[in-house]
Amino acid sequence: MVSDVYLSLNIDDPAERALRKAHTFLGEYKIPNRQFVKISDKDLRLFNWDPKTGYVVCDAGRIDSLIGRTTPRVYFQKSGETWSPASPAEQTGVQSLPDIILDEGMNTPPHIIAIDPHTGRKSLLMDLNPQFQNLALARVEEITWKDAHGIEVKGGLYWPPEYVAGKKYPLILQTHGWYSDRFWMDGPYTTGFAAQALAGKGFFVLQDDDPDWHLAETEASKEAPRAMASFEGAIDYLDRRGLIDRNRVGITGFSRTYWYVTYMLTHSKHQRFAAAALADGVDFSYFQYMILPDVPLELEPVYGGPPYKKKMSRWLKESPAFLMDRIETPLRIQTLGPDSVLADWHWYTGLSLLGKPVEMVYIPEGVHILEKPWERLISQQGNLEWFCFWIKGEEDPDPAKAEQYERWRELRKLQEKSQGSTTKR
């Protein structure tokens, strides 16, 4: 018995093909002949099945049940070869089977366990990542701090495995969400995130939570400033704990937090970053306003209107892209596919024309959340090496990467020249 199954589209009936494109199915697999018998095309998650009585129990709303929301139960029963809806009253005598669940936590890699419904005893069925036993993984601590507005924020702090008390470490601030009941090797996404790898290289890594920054239109202008206050509050908190060297802090932005990070790089008077990395996101700029069809609906509430006439002054004052001359941070930008490279191109050309250290990486077939191993390696390993180079002065001795470091050393000369010009002014 299985739920959430996609069926083959290799069929002649157009109505059935359309149904299979739009729905997943609950059904019965007959092992000897591999026949699949459909029971329902509703959004169901299989909860219990008694093969002796032919009685099936499902949670209605597969996604809701997976994230712990209470859902109603749906019942089916087999009579002969026919499945039909049933009622809870017909459940008499149904065997209570163990619950099979994915068990994980911020310091517990995911594994499949069975829970006895009578005693609650847990039994390990499958360790999904036995190789983790051979790795010195970072310990993750959930921390809480307050930003300048008194808003409480949570995040996951990855400790360097070889942490020495009293020593101050560099910090990488990863943005875009935190859940304490999940085990994250990299962070919430694969694009650009590399939490455990960075911790293994001697960084503290803070995975910053994403409070509900998507504010009502009347408060849309506060979204990026509130995110900046959260980031600054986190750095202040770790500095007060004596854990980090605030002069050696890096930050990553992805998707919507691309905007938050560029806003902070151009607006923060409180924190300067030693390096930054961005990937495939929106920056709420004039250029993206013009080329992306859905963006204007979001941008106009942020700036009080379109970028014309009286409202233009607000855009010039607030939009990070109009203020990129303020950026003093080496920036690595990842673009995924043609639309992404077009939407983010103005950052590369603008910073290059200003003589700022910037690098753009183009992954032609990359999707928003990277899946292919080679593409993830370019994204995640590239960020790891970028932060090690700029913040710790470390280079990978692999001869295959010699050209990369030669290029980055030239960027470092640009950085030194830019900083010298700033000092003279």
Image: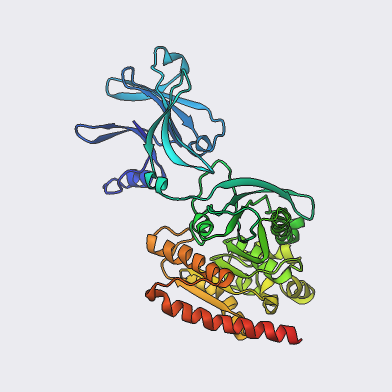
What residue is drawn where x is 46% and y is 50%?
136
Q: Is residue 222 visible?
A: yes
What residue is drawn where x is 52% and y is 50%?
138
Compared with residue 226, is residue 88 higher up or lower down, i.e. above or below?
above
Depth check: 388 or 222 in front? 388
Compared with residue 376, is residue 275 higher up or lower down, i.e. above or below?
below
In the picture, residue 125 is in which quadrant? Answer: top left
Colour approach in the figure: rainbow
* In the image: residue 66, left or right of residue 425: left
* In the image: residue 369, left or right of residue 239: left
Considering every residue shown, the one lying at the far left of the view is 32
What residue is drawn where x is 72% and y is 66%?
271
What residue is drawn where x is 39% and y is 22%?
97
Depth check: 318 or 15 in front? 318
Estimate the x, y position of residue 171 in percent, counting from the top left: 62, 60
* In the image: residue 281, left or right of residue 34: right
Q: Is residue 350 visible?
A: no
Q: Give the total of numbered labels.
A: 0
Q: Quadrant of the N terminus?
A: top left
Compared with residue 242, is residue 81 higher up or lower down, i.e. above or below?
above
Depth check: 197 or 233 in front? 197
Estimate the x, y position of residue 23 in percent, counting from the top left: 41, 42
Estimate the x, y position of residue 33 in percent, counting from the top left: 19, 34
Q: Quadrant of the C terminus?
A: bottom right
Estimate the x, y position of residue 202 in percent, counting from the top left: 55, 60
In the picture, residue 274 is in which quadrant? Answer: bottom right
